[in-house]
């Protein structure tokens, strides 16, 4: 929170307002404001008073903000600063920058508590909450919003909210049997499997790993292809997998984005089948590239060694 593009936070704010130092902007505009003035930080009590939706006042009124989050002592901060920072700005400016950033961290933490309260009240255990209506919806029935937010709760120190989510997950034995519909392996991997594994890596709570293992086993059904690259969609209830209907090729970003989660799942379970499947898919991508370096966004999906399809290359 204390740095942006290598600058102390206050300097980063100054230069982001118009492309130059705040003092220069004030001089150019003839402003009489002091160069030492800082942008005001809105107090939590000043949050918008009229909720967007009827019945949502419960999430904004009579809610006590949590106490300020933990901060490092000056001695702990000094031990963390690279020498280059100290040489450039000095310890006094760096400490000032951190203390200016601390209230912003608290504001962000309160915003997370606010949105989590609404999710718990309106869509607990559902994949999505609709921000316009406050309704809930599912697409793969894995409580995706919950799983996606677990590591954020932990890192923000919102342990009560984290524990509530854990108890719910522990009671559900996901993924549940029956048809869920086929949905993106890419999204399920990064949001559901990744969410479970990151939560487990932080907390070591067993239900996260147990659920991740069951989900990983379902996702593995899509890797039974000629080259080992995974099919694009899977039903997490039945294990049925299929390619996308909107494109007749495999998508590079989907094929090459499962490796971190699957390798970590093997690391913590001791079962190498997950890493082996993901690594086989990645090897297929490397074999497809050959000596060409960059490859396009699509690969053939039925060949033992996938062929690059088209010429479109995308970054980011």
Image: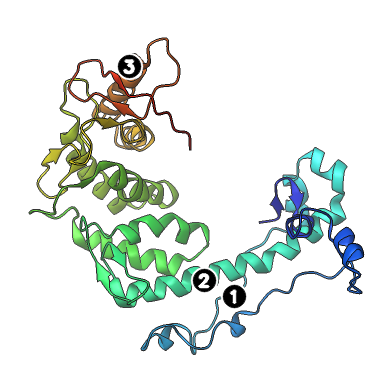
Vertical placement of 1 versus 53: above or below?
above
**CA distance for labels 2 and 1:** 14 Å
Q: Is residue 215 above or below residue 51?
A: above
Residue at mark 2: 111
Q: Is residue 312 visible?
A: yes
To which residue does mark 3 refer? 288
Circles 2 and 1: CB atoms closer than 8 Å: no
- Residue drawn 69% across and 58% down? 72
Front one among 24 and 3: 24
Image location of residue 213, percent across then percent down: 24, 42
Q: Is residue 214 left or right of residue 65?
A: left
Residue 162 in which image quadrant? bottom left
Residue beneath disc 1 = 67
- Left or right: where 108 falls relative to 25: left
Sequence-first disc among 3 and 2:
2
Mark 1 lies on a secondary structure that is: loop
Q: Residue at x 78, y 57 (%)?
A: 74
Horizontal side of 47 relative to 264 (left or right) equals: right
The quadrant holding residue 256 is top left
Instruction: Please tell me which residue lies in front, 81 or 271.
Output: 81
Say what secondary structure mark 2 lies in. Answer: helix
Q: Relative to the observer, which residue lies in front, 16 or 77?
A: 16
Q: CA distance from mark 1 to mark 3?
A: 54 Å
Q: Give the image location of residue 204, x and y in percent.
A: 38, 49
Q: Can the viewer see residue 69 in this picture?
A: no
Q: Is residue 36 left or right of residue 153?
A: right
The 10 Å Cα crowd at callout 3, few under 14, some 14 to 19, many 20 or more, is some
> Which residue does the image show at 34% across and 73% down from the upper left?
120
Dot in front, 2 or 1? 2
* Contact check, label 3 and label 2, Cβ < 8 Å: no
């Amino acid at each position: 929170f204390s740095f942006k593009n290598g600058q102390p936070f206050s300097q980063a704010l100054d230069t982001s307002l118009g492309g130059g130092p705040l003092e220069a902007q004030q001089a150019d505009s003839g402003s009489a404001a002091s160069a030492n003035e800082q942008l005001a930080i809105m107090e939590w009590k000043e949050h918008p008073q009229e909720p967007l939706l009827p019945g949502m006042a419960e999430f904004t009124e009579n809610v006590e903000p949590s106490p300020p989050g933990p901060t490092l002592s000056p001695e702990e901060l000094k031990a963390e600063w690279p020498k280059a920072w100290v040489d450039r700005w000095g310890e006094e400016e760096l400490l000032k920058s951190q203390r200016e950033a601390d209230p912003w961290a608290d504001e962000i933490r309160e915003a997370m508590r606010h949105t989590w309260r609404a999710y718990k009240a309106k869509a607990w255990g559902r994949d999505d909450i609709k921000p316009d209506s406050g309704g809930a919806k599912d697409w793969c029935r894995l409580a995706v919003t919950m799983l996606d937010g677990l590591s954020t709760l932990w890192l923000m120190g919102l342990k009560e909210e984290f524990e509530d989510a854990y108890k719910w997950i522990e009671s559900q034995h996901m993924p549940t049997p029956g048809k869920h519909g086929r949905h993106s392996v890419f999204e399920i991997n990064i949001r559901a499997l990744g969410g479970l594994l990151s939560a487990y890596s932080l907390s070591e709570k067993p239900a996260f790993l147990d659920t991740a293992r069951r989900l990983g086993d379902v996702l593995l059904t899509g890797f039974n292809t000629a080259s080992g690259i995974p099919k694009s969609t899977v039903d997490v209830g039945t294990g049925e997998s299929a390619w996308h209907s909107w494109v007749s090729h495999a998508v590079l970003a989907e094929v090459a984005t499962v490796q971190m989660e699957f390798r970590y799942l093997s690391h913590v379970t001791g079962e190498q089948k997950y890493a082996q499947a993901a690594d086989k898919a990645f090897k297929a991508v490397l074999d497809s590239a050959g000596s060409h370096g960059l490859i396009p966004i699509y690969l053939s999906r039925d060949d033992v060694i996938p062929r690059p399809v088209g010429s479109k290359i995308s970054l980011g």
